[in-house]
Image: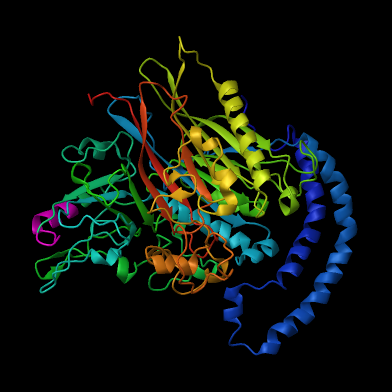
Amino acid sequence: MVLYTSPFPNSFLSVLHSFSWGLIFPCYWLADRLVGSFVPTTYEKRQRADDPCYFHALCIIITTPIYLALLVASLPFALIGFLLWSPLQSARRPYIYSRLKDKNHANGATLLTEWKAAGSGKSFCFGSANVCLLPDSLARFNNVFNTQARAKEIGRRIRNGASRPQIKIYIDSPTNTSISAASFSSLVSPQAGDNRTVNAGIKRTTSMEYKGDNCGSNNGEENREDKGGSGEPHEGEENTCIVPINGEENGHMSDTETDTINGQARAGGPAEPSLEGDAEISKTPNHKQKEGDSGSLDSCSASRESLVKVRVGDGTVDQSTVNNKLLYKASIMKKTSVRKKKHTDETFDHEISAFFPANLDFLCLQEVFDKRAAEKLKEQLHHYFEYIVYDVGVYSCNGCCSFKFVNSGLLFASRYPVMDAAYHCYPNGRGMDSLASKGALFLKVQVGSTPQDQRIVGYISCTHLQAIAGDTTVRCEQLDMLQDWLSEFRKSTSSSSTANPEELVAFDVLCGDLNFDNCSSEDKLEQQHSLFTHYKDPCRVGPGEDKPWAIGTLLDPEGLYDEEVCTPDNLQKVLESEEGRKGYLVYPTSKNHSSSQKGRKASLKGNGRRIDYMLYTEEGLYLEWKVEVEEFSFITQLAGLTDHLPVAMRLVVSTGEDDP
């Protein structure tokens, strides 16, 4: 299958399309600004609290007639442009495939080595997020604004979080087996008279200023050779530093263990400098660095609550050797051999993380509707991901029943090459959703090859379902179509036979914003859909019941800019407590509770509306391999930039072979 690297088959149509959009854009921009001026966000309201009440009204009175006059003047040109633009969409391709040609541009990414299916297996990390990159006037109805600046900041945070070294600290704590949501500040440095224990019951990833040099440089081949001993990592876990810490005397670190941490941290060589000198001041409200804001890894300091300090004797480790501007991740987890959990049937780690997972391999985004924002986001993501599929969808009446003003909003980024891609539009959208070409994007990627020259491939699908509450039948119909399209894509792109397999399928993952949760009584039909008999949900026990550690992914828009949750670390700490979740997550609707989320203390079912899903299946994979979930994360790094929590899942493909 040929991948489309441009939206039109020839340059003439591309030029004509650019000309028509140039005629439309002034009218579109003015209308967006005019409507946006009447829809302030809570952040803007607080900023204006100190201004005289008449000042904003005066600005509206002055600017509104100007916008209206310019809008009327631009309408004739927009009409001519629309008459040119609309028929051109019949020749438009359903997506644009972008491959990074200059590898030096990806200065935040570790170079991948091809997987040869040797060793015990390999892990792959998947992420998904709804980023709400709508035209600014529409985004304001979700209490977010400045779409262009948010797009750049979202991309910067994602690639900074994914490109940092992966530091894993394994703690044996035989006295503490609780996985209740505890603060990471319980992991403290040993001081005189301090008998607090290290709480290793919950795995919590937060920002920390790591003492020492980069744990793993971008050239990770030498580091992988030194990873013998405890906790042998899976093949392909780049930039991973594993530090075992034994549970001794209330969980305190011994001097020997401290030396181990510093020694392993220095083993990887010099660190990569901060990317592109990120001294630029963003226009997004929560990018102003303050205490506790470490969502941007370029911050010069981490929040005190999440800063882990290692002390030797009666003095702090000398920081004169620190030459890395990035703030690194510390993953605190139980060692597999001695892991004790409250839920004994759970076989993988789960966490609320302030960062996107290190070594993120695949990223699926929803609601990237604005084309200018998509370009800015793509530019940032290309610092880490070599392959990106964006501007996915159809416009006008091309291939759909109703007129489409915007695309599907789907975007896919990968560190591995894309072999095939296909897009399908849901024809049954209703209301406002019918104006967007919501659908599903299907991709086939190559992740390696065997010594017998058989390709190792994986399948990833991304979708966004009908959003309007009460449209249960519409979503069920879309899930039916999604299943059919999944099967068709597998059949049309498979070049293997059972007798002579040319390809070995390592994984099949489905993710996206499904716009229903597993606890609401109104969503019973979706919860019982046959899709969940073929694809597994790591957060789900069964229809109507989530696992106790799973939390909602839909944030209450009114609280996005509250001091308690406006930074990644703060939002992380709030979501770890039940009372915090009640205040800042949207819960399933109920006749017994008011629609207001803030300050609600009543007992509610579940831990919020989890509408963003990460599913995987074992059907159709290579029979001799086994796929298991290694960890699942709810991510707060985009705090203040979107009204959804991103989710991430790391899968391990076990080949059953011993390391050579």
- Answer with the quarter of the image where residue 596 lies: bottom right
Q: Closest to the observer: 296 or 232?
A: 232
Q: Relative to 146, is 54 on the left or the right?
A: right
Q: Is residue 600 magenta?
A: no
Relative to 538, 212 lies left or right: left
Magenta stretch: give its range. Answer: 249-263
Q: In the rendered image, is residue 448 in sight?
A: yes
| One can see residue 356 in this view | no
User: Residue at coordinates 66% horizontally, 39% vertically from top-left?
Assistant: 477
- Picture quadrant of residue 573: bottom left
Whole-percent x and y of residue 153?
52, 59
Is residue 259 within the magenta segment? yes
Q: Residue at x 45, y 57 (%)?
A: 606
Q: Is residue 41 above or below residue 217?
A: below
Q: Position of residue 192 (x, y in %)?
A: 10, 73
Could you say where residue 492 lies in the image, as x and y percent from the top left?
A: 60, 22
Q: Quadrant of the C terminus?
A: top left
